[in-house]
């Protein structure tokens, strides 16, 4: 009886922990001599805007980083994961969804809506990525007459990111090398390989947390804390051949008071300044970031902001009003808005 009481208490605490405030997120990381996000439709080259030379990274890539970290490191359940079956095949979304149907209902003739509700309940309670990012989940279930019926579950995620963009033009370098194996069977010559990298790219991701959607997917404050860890530590620990060279620099979260307000376009409120041409940038010492527009906006709307959360590795220098370079946290504190450090390590 005591265990049941404690469990019910934990569930009640979890339900009262639902996100109730609008948040804006701005995440900055850099990439050195690697491929931040290859385009499979263009030889896996780093994605760029052909008109401006800006490096692009899809929101799907960032979400994959977060999912992989939460699943592999924190052992949290996620719905969208690449896990092959015993025969080596990837399951489709319908098969993945069936895993969340209770065993007692799998072979039972029951109304579709009842099975659908049970699947939805289990997915939302177990899968943090659906609570964060939502999902469209196709279903194929047997109804009370034993006939296969198709339906779906749709949740719009409370956490949405725009496509990541570099603060400057980049160049894409083509690198050729040799492989470890022969190019063909019974050949002595090694195979050649080609890959593409950017020497340097400072990338910014802008996102919003919608408190109204949070109620629908039951997104909690604990889930948001996990999201921030996934962004920072997931990027930091992305140790693959094409991604080694990614380093998180700044994670800025603006938490608003109730009222459906957000400043929007945080990515347009920061810019870089350097004596070097864009394509010659190679590290954080080659530029400073100008924060005038961000500070002006914060001062203008400070009465609507509850607090600012920040994680900064203190390698990027910021300037405002042509003052001496300093760290972003010090600049933010000058607005009078409460500033707290995000503890992610």
Image (cartoon, rainbow, N blue to C red):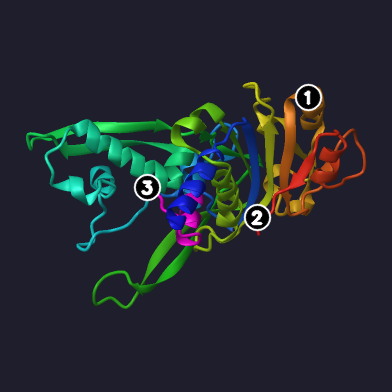
**Residue 72 magenta:** yes
Label annotation for residue 344: 2
Q: Residue 45, percent across and down?
A: 47, 48
Is 20 displayed left or right of 190 in the figure? right
| Tag 1 residue | 303
Q: Nearer the viewer, residue 17 or 49?
A: 17
Q: Which residues are magenta?
A: 66-79
Instruction: Give the secondary structure at mark 3.
Output: loop
Q: Nearer the viewer, residue 251 or 38?
A: 251
Q: Nearer the viewer, residue 289 or 20?
A: 20
Q: Residue 192, percent across and down?
A: 40, 65
Q: Nearer the viewer, mark 3 or mark 1?
A: 1
* Distance (Cα) linking label 2 and label 1: 27 Å
| Tag 3 residue | 79
Between discs 3 and 1, the one toward the N terminus: 3
Q: Residue 119, percent across and down?
A: 29, 41
Q: Do we see residue 282 in this rendering?
A: yes
């Amino acid at each position: 009886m005591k265990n049941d009481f404690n469990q019910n208490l934990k569930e009640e605490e979890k339900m009262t922990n639902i996100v109730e405030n609008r948040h804006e997120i701005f995440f900055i990381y850099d990439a050195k001599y690697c491929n931040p996000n290859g385009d499979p439709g263009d030889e896996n080259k780093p994605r760029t805007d052909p008109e401006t030379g800006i490096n692009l990274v899809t929101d799907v890539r960032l979400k994959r980083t977060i999912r992989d970290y939460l699943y592999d490191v924190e052992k949290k359940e996620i719905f969208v994961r690449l896990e092959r079956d015993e025969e080596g095949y990837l399951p489709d979304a319908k098969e993945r969804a069936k895993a969340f149907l209770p065993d007692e209902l799998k072979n039972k003739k029951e109304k579709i809506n009842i099975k659908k509700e049970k699947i939805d309940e289990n997915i939302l309670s177990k899968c943090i990525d659906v609570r964060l990012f939502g999902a469209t989940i196709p279903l194929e279930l047997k109804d009370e007459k034993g006939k296969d019926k198709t339906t779906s579950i749709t949740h719009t995620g409370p956490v949405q990111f725009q496509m990541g963009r570099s603060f400057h033009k980049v160049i894409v370098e083509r690198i050729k090398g040799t492989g470890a194996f022969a190019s063909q069977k019974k050949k002595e010559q090694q195979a050649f390989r080609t890959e593409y990298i950017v020497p340097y790219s400072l990338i910014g991701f802008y996102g919003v947390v919608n408190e109204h959607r949070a109620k629908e997917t039951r997104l909690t404050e604990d889930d948001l804390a996990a999201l921030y860890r996934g962004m920072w530590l997931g990027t930091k620990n992305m140790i693959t051949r094409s991604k080694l060279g990614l380093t998180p620099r700044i994670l800025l979260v603006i938490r608003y008071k109730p009222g459906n307000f957000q400043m929007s376009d945080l990515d347009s409120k920061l810019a870089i300044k350097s004596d070097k041409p864009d394509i010659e940038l190679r590290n954080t010492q080659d530029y400073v970031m100008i924060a005038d527009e961000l500070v002006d906006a914060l001062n203008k709307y400070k009465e609507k902001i509850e607090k600012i959360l920040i994680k900064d590795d203190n390698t990027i220098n910021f300037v405002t009003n042509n003052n001496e370079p300093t760290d972003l946290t010090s600049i933010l504190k000058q607005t009078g808005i409460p500033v707290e450090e995000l503890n992610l390590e």
